[in-house]
Amino acid sequence: MFIEILNKIKEYNRIIIHRHIRPDGDCMGSQMGLKYLLKNSFPEKEVYAVGDELPEYLKELGEVDIISDEYYKDALVIVVDTANESRICDGRWQTGKYIIKIDHHDDSPEFGDLWYVDETSPACSSIIVRMIKAWGNEVKMCEKAGYALYFGIVTDTGRFRYRGLTSEVLNNAGYLLDLGVDVDTLYNKLYIDDVATLKLQGYVLNNFKTTPNGVAYIYFSKKIIEKFGVTKDEAANLVNSISTIKGYPVWCAFIEQGLPKPENLAKGELDPSKEIRVRLRSRGVTINGVASRYRGGGHLQACGATIYSKKEMKLLLEELDLLVKQYKEEHPDAL
Ligand SMILES: [Mn+2]
């Protein structure tokens, strides 16, 4: 399979790499890692990484390329770290001449002309490294690509902590280290907090709520987000502030999006001004089924959803609470 992918890369002069919307470290690491690798290996080829605006912490990995629609006509498109077509950033991917998908999500449907999905890999960036190793001397790896891929592995495995970590992932990280990746710089940049976020973390620790059987959650109203002067993403990222509470194996954050109310809303259409994003996390409990019932999905124990009322929030929490109850009955030793 990897050789087939390489042959396609060799065949095309223009390669456009896509990632998912609302970018994270792993999709950016995969995208930029692949871009730098291909640029370094095939200097005569045009390689672009497209997508929308990046959050501050991802900007050091590279810039988003602005390209015209024309470019797609004879291009190879590679989509990384994205399960569903609807989550691919920039809809022009479909207009590429040949489309390859590389992903690690559960229930990742087939799309494009060629796909490689390994849902057991905890990071797409680690799959990219697996592929680079398989390509051997056919490509020329560089430190810049290594940095991006290491960034992806570190963020999607929670610094090598989450389930799904294997010796292969650690070996892949080791391979990147040998390229001279400066881990000190990477960790310093990645895990530095600003005052506003830390103050909001204090708010989370003082104000999270719980359900009877073991779901901890925090609600970020638009007002609170504004009061603390953080972005919605920064607030959402604080979900893991409540990840280590004994007896609460499921935790989540609700983030009011504060979007403007549209002028004409068709009957039965969802009102974006009511939108509340949900980040769900767990230890052991499979929760992505619940997420998919509320317009979302993702990994078994890390996923997202979107709801439109406090009533939906109540229902979602009840479903999660029931899952925890069942989980604790089956796992009396659960923490
Ligand atoms: Mn990922």
Image (spheres, rainbow, N blue to C red):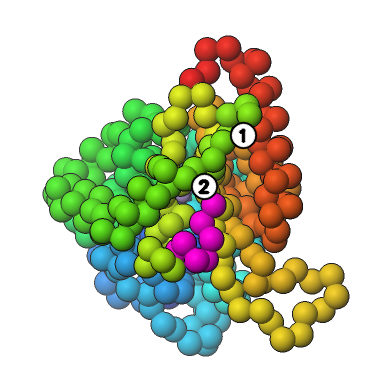
* Left or right: residue 181 compared with residue 281: left
What residue is rendered at 52% in x and 18% in y? 334
- The residue closer to the viewer here, 62 or 241, is 241
Q: Measured along the vertical axis of the image, is residue 166 above or below residue 79?
A: above
- Residue 218 numbered tag: 2
Q: Measured along the vertical axis of the image, is residue 163 above or below residue 51?
A: above
Inspect the image, locate mark 1, and give the three-letter code of the amino acid beneath it.
Answer: Thr
Question: In the rendered structure, does residue 224 fall within the stretch colored magenta?
Answer: yes
Mark 2: which secondary structure? Answer: strand
Are dots 2 and 1 in contact, CB under 8 Å? Answer: no
- Residue 166 numbered tag: none
The number of callouts visible is: 2
Report if residue 271 is visible in the image.
Answer: yes
What residue is rendered at 65% in x and 72% in y? 273
Q: Measured along the vertical axis of the image, is residue 38 above or below residue 66?
A: above
* Left or right: residue 87 compared with residue 127: right
Name the residue furthest top.
332
- The residue closer to the viewer here, 237 or 148, is 237
Q: CA distance from mark 2 to mark 1?
A: 11 Å
- Residue 211 numbered tag: 1
